[in-house]
């Protein structure tokens, strides 16, 4: 073994200080983002409301009964008409979760904003949405419900 090779192992003090400095800067910038769950819960609620709109459209087609998606400033809920034959009957039958026993409804996490603050969308037995062309915005993320098809465009 050459004598020069035996002295060229390891890191210099400058390299070690540089790496420690970079790790310190990275942790100061990146760690607060991991502990702030606001974006995570906001995105989860957005996905939840968009999923509820999709489910309402599919349930209306499958059951042949109108389904209403109600959105307020802090919540959403799905309801069906009391009578599927009488299109003037009230939407007072609560839609249940498909895999559970609870109502298909939810509340916005604190700090989450919904726009419009009050909205009622009715999906008919053909899957059409009334009113159509409605855009729902949740903390800057939007999805649109197409009227003629009931398609929920969350692209």
Image: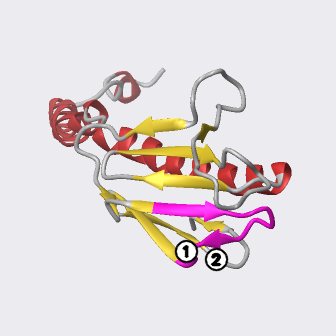
Q: Is residue 30 left or right of residue 134?
A: left
Q: What element carries label 1?
A: loop
Res. 96 image quadrant: top right
Q: Which residue is at the front of the view, 2 or 112? A: 112
Q: Name the residue under label 1.
A: 131
Give the magenta range: 120-133
Q: Label 2: few (<14), some or many (≥20) within 10 Å?
A: some
**Badge nearest the viewer, 1 or 2:** 1
Which label belongs to residue 116? none
Position of residue 10 relative to residue 73, above or below, is above
Res. 140 image quadrant: bottom left
Residue found 59% across the figure and 48% down from its top: 52
* Label 1 or label 2, whichever comes before in sequence order: 1
Across and down, in percent, residue 64 comes to 83, 55
Residue found 35% across the figure and 65% down from its top: 116
Q: In this view, does 63 lie to the left or right of 123?
A: right
Residue found 32% across the figure and 37% down from its top: 109
Q: Is residue 3 magenta?
A: no
Q: Name the residue under label 2.
A: 147
Position of residue 129 relative to residue 79, above or below, is below
Q: Which residue is at the front of the view, 152 or 150? A: 150
Residue found 44% across the figure and 25% down from its top: 2
Across and down, in percent, residue 34 comes to 30, 34
Across and down, in percent, residue 101 comes to 65, 21
Position of residue 25 relative to residue 118, above or below, is above
**For the C terminus, which image quadrant?**
bottom right
Q: What element carries label 2?
A: loop
Q: Label 1: few (<14), some or many (≥20) within 10 Å?
A: some
Q: In this view, does 10 lie to the left or right of 132?
A: left
């Amino acid at each position: 073994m050459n004598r020069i090779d035996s002295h060229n192992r390891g890191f210099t003090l400058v390299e070690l200080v540089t790496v420690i400095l970079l790790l310190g800067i990275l942790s100061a910038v990146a760690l607060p983002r991991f502990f702030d769950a606001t974006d995570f819960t906001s995105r989860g609620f957005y996905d939840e409301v968009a999923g509820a709109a999709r489910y309402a459209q599919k349930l209306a087609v499958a059951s042949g009964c109108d389904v209403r998606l109600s959105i307020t400033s802090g919540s959403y809920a799905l309801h069906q008409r009391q009578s599927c034959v009488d299109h003037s009957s009230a939407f007072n039958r609560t839609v249940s979760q498909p895999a559970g026993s609870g109502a298909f409804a939810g509340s916005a996490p604190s700090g989450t904003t919904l726009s419009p603050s009050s909205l009622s969308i009715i999906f008919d037995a053909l899957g059409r949405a009334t009113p159509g062309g409605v855009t729902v915005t949740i903390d800057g993320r939007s999805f649109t419900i197409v009227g003629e098809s009931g398609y929920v465009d969350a692209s």
